[in-house]
Amino acid sequence: MMKRFLSVGLILVLLAALLLAGCGGSKQAEDNKDNASAPQKDKLKVAALLPGTINDQGWNATAYRGLKLIEEKFGAEIAYTEKVAQSDMEENFRGYASQGFDIVIGHGFEFGDAAKKVAPEFPDVKFIVTSTNIHQEPNLASLNTDNYEQGFLQGVVAGLITKTGKVGAVGGMEIPPIADSLRGFEKGAKYVNQNVEVLSAFTGDFEDAAKAKETALAMIEKGADVIMADADQAGIGAIEAAKEKGVLAIGANGDQNSLAPDTVVTSGFDDLAFAMEILVNDIVNGKFEPKFYDLGVAEGAVYLAPYHSFEDKLDQAVKDKIQQIFEDMKSNKLDAHALDK
């Protein structure tokens, strides 16, 4: 009789355990179903429209570095279109916005009008235009790295290392950012060397390296022994001229020493890649404002590239002077813009 009661009890315990397991399994299945149906966070998508090519060792290459930095830091999907003509700007902005890109960047002030027209059509997309100060509610901002301060630092270097007392600055198209750069170059050179003569000219083109080379050669013929070129792809021609004639050069918009290691002393680094990262970080963290973001030496977006092989060729006093001016600009002790008034 006792064995029968034990058997019945054992059966009841087993049945209860099975019921509990079934309930637990149902709850787990329900949880899994809920997790499967939960919305997944979309990958950040960032695109850029470029006026030139990413291998120009200058302006467009900087934007590409910015995209790659954003890809690495934020795990973003990136895309870009090179050599976008003015007639195609609106179409390209709409194309990326329609494809679900969260941020679309027009790399250059010339994209401003198209961005202002297209942005209202896609209020959930952030539109950014570089090298200008435009902005528009609720989703259009501009991003600028201080071209004048970059030119000023380059001019400081040129004014300190010239032996002839003449230096040259070759610009591409005569547009605000390039004009700012050349004006800053002259102010920087004269800040450290009041007697220096600054030769400057615009070629009117960002791709014609032969014309930039010809312009630089003409300056060298007049006695310039330091050449700076801010002309994107065309600027490579000016560096070639300096190399051929045995004079020094200063790069622009990135470290251009590799183009002529024994010629390019340093480069004015207009770190748009870093500036792009700062702005995208604001967007990701919900801090975006439709305003003009202006970043320079103080923000870490403008500086000089390493001296490379010239580290031991330049007098220490010259390097110390350059560094001191840079530090004064960084701490706002020196307002380079005030010298332009």
Image (spheres, rainbow, N blue to C red):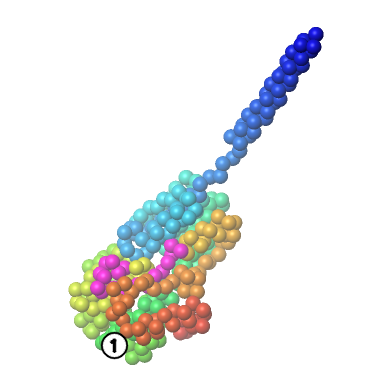
Rendering coords of residue 29 (x, y %): 63, 29
Image height of 138 relative to 308, above or below: above
x then y, percent, for residue 44: 50, 49
Residue extending farthest bottom: 195
Which secondary structure, mark 1?
loop
The residue range painted magenta reads 256-274
The residue at 31%/59% (across/down) is 55
Which residue carries the number 1 mark? 165
For image coordinates 25% across by 69% down, the residue present is: 260
Question: In the image shown, does 76 or 203 lie closer to the viewer?
Answer: 76
The picture places residue 269, in percent across and down from the top left corner, at 39, 70
Which residue lies most toward the left here? 244
Magenta stretch containing residue 61, yes or no?
no
Taking the image as shown, residue 188 lies to the left or right of residue 310, namely: right
Q: So how many labels did they put on this image? A: 1
Up/down of 111 relative to 215, above or below: above
Outermost residue toward the top?
Answer: 1
Q: Is residue 270 magenta?
A: yes
Q: Nearer the viewer, residue 191 or 210?
A: 191
Regarding residue 227, the answer to whether it shows in the image is no
Q: Quadrant of residue 177?
A: bottom left
Q: Where, by quadrant of the figure, is residue 321 drawn?
A: bottom left
Residue at figure coordinates x 53%, y 45% from the top left: 42
Q: Amino acid at mark 1?
A: Gly
Quadrant of the image for the N terminus?
Answer: top right
- Give percent across and percent down for residue 146: 45, 72
Left or right: residue 182 versus residue 338 is: left
314 sits to left or right of 135: left
Q: Is residue 106 visible?
A: yes
Q: Residues within 10 Å of mark 1 (few under 14, many from 20)?
A: some
Kindly identify the residue that appears in the image at 58 percent across and 34 percent down. Answer: 36
